[in-house]
Image (cartoon, grey):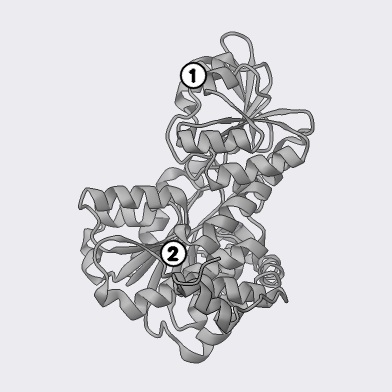
Amino acid sequence: MTQTSQKRATGLSTGERFTRSNVVSGYEGDIADIDLAPQGKTRIEWADRSMPALQLIRERFRKIKPFKGVRMAACLHVTSETANLMRTLKDGGAKVALCASNPLSTQDDVAASLVKDYGIAVYAINGENNKVYYQHINQALDFKPQVTMDDGADLVSTIHSERAELIDTIWAGTEETTTGVIRLKAMEKDNALKFAIIAVNDSKTKHFFDNRYGTGQSTIDGIVRATNHLLAGSTVVVAGYGWCGRGFATRVAGMGSHVIVTEVDPVKGIEAVMDGYRVMPMAQAAKVGDLFVTLTGDIHVIRPEHFNAMKDGAIVCNSGHFNVELDLDGLAKISSRKRKVRPFVEEYTLKNGRKIHILGEGRLINLASAEGHPAMVMDMSFANQALAAEYVVNNHKKLKNKVYMIPEKIDNEIARIKLKSMGVKLDKLTAEQVKYLASWEIGT
């Protein structure tokens, strides 16, 4: 088969499009178009400029080869930032296979560059259907990994449900996001988890920054690119006031929006009130919101009764990991018509005559229509992933089938490296101060 004939076909339905097993003879992977590699390499290099902490880790890994001979399978968003993590793992000696953690998050040019320029197997195509999504996960698992990396736990879930023969040779895995950690902790609670997981998401240098500052900015970016909607003066309903929700609420309020928060947790609810936002149930918020964003990690946060109550022209999107936060099947049942009105915007005409606009098929809007988090914040997230993988390699024999936090020493080291890369210095405690903090005898 020629290179041209193996490129992603155009004008075909999603189900027809993904049928071949390799891109070009001599390369491992299944991607859209190998000719996109030059564009992708430039994009990877641009992101790398804003990832100095990962650069320092890569430099050390290149010297000591902590992953020499180690097989890794990663199910992550295939973006320029992720590409630099993959480069870091490979430079550390690992054999890596990468697949997408979301059908709409793959940057096809980046995937092409990883395959052609860096020799990393990638199984990911932007817009792949559900069948091909899981086909790609299984192709990454065919590498028989000793270490897994996940963003949403689909890789680990597939191993446990369909590829149990791999469990005995897997040392441990890492998990990138809140949704995945929730799923994995549920598996641990049910004694279903068969190998250890390091919850990268729970590191301070991950969720305090990635979830708050990254999600806050990139969600706005995705919404504006998809709609060109004016945020100033709009009433924006934020479902969920975890770190992602509060990050988005802060930034959209800074753009001049009137923010309403919906919550089920009383502590988070009162926190949102004291941060200056109105807090109310979704049933009430549905009647007044112009723009709705879900960031909860739960299912059916916005349901048919909410869609029916919304204003004509309401915009609805999701910035939680999975599209299940919006009950799209329920929306379809109460609609008389659906049509695409802009890239990444589908208009549902309800039977009551009102129109609802769903962005990015209900998937992560910050990756569906934008580029995800800025590289500068992903620098810390992927520093966590890289050092968590090193921790697994060095300590896997001591780990039980549990979900672990990354050691605080590693978390603090990432913060130190990041500050150093930014040219920021901290104070140091004097001997007198150290003694005072350790003493119970010294008073007023």
Q: Quadrant of residue 289?
A: top right
Residue at image mark 2: 74
| Viewer-nearest of discs 2 and 1 | 1
**Which residue is at 27% across, 70% downward?**
399
**Circle 2 sits in a helix, a strand or a loop, which is it?**
strand
Q: How crowded is mark 2: few (under 14 residues within 10 Å), some or many (20 or more)?
A: many
Q: Earlier in the sequence, mark 2 or mark 1?
A: 2
Q: Can residue 365 be seen in this view?
A: no
**Which residue is at 51% across, 84% downward?**
61
Which amino acid, by three-letter code, is at mark 2? Ala
Residue at image mark 1: 304
Q: Position of residue 317 (x, y in %)?
A: 59, 34
Answer with left or right where residue 186 lies relative to residue 257: left
Q: Position of residue 196 (x, y in %)?
A: 29, 64
Q: Which quadrant of the rendered structure holds the C terminus?
A: bottom right
**CA distance separating discs 2 and 1:** 36 Å
**Circle 1 sits in a helix, a strand or a loop, which is it?**
helix
**Which residue is at 50% across, 26% downward?**
302
Q: Which residue lies furthest to the front in this view?
A: 444
Residue 327 or residue 345, whichever sits in front: 327
Q: Where is residue 206 in the image (x, y as percent from the top left)?
A: 53, 60
Q: In this view, does 333 lie above or below 255?
A: above
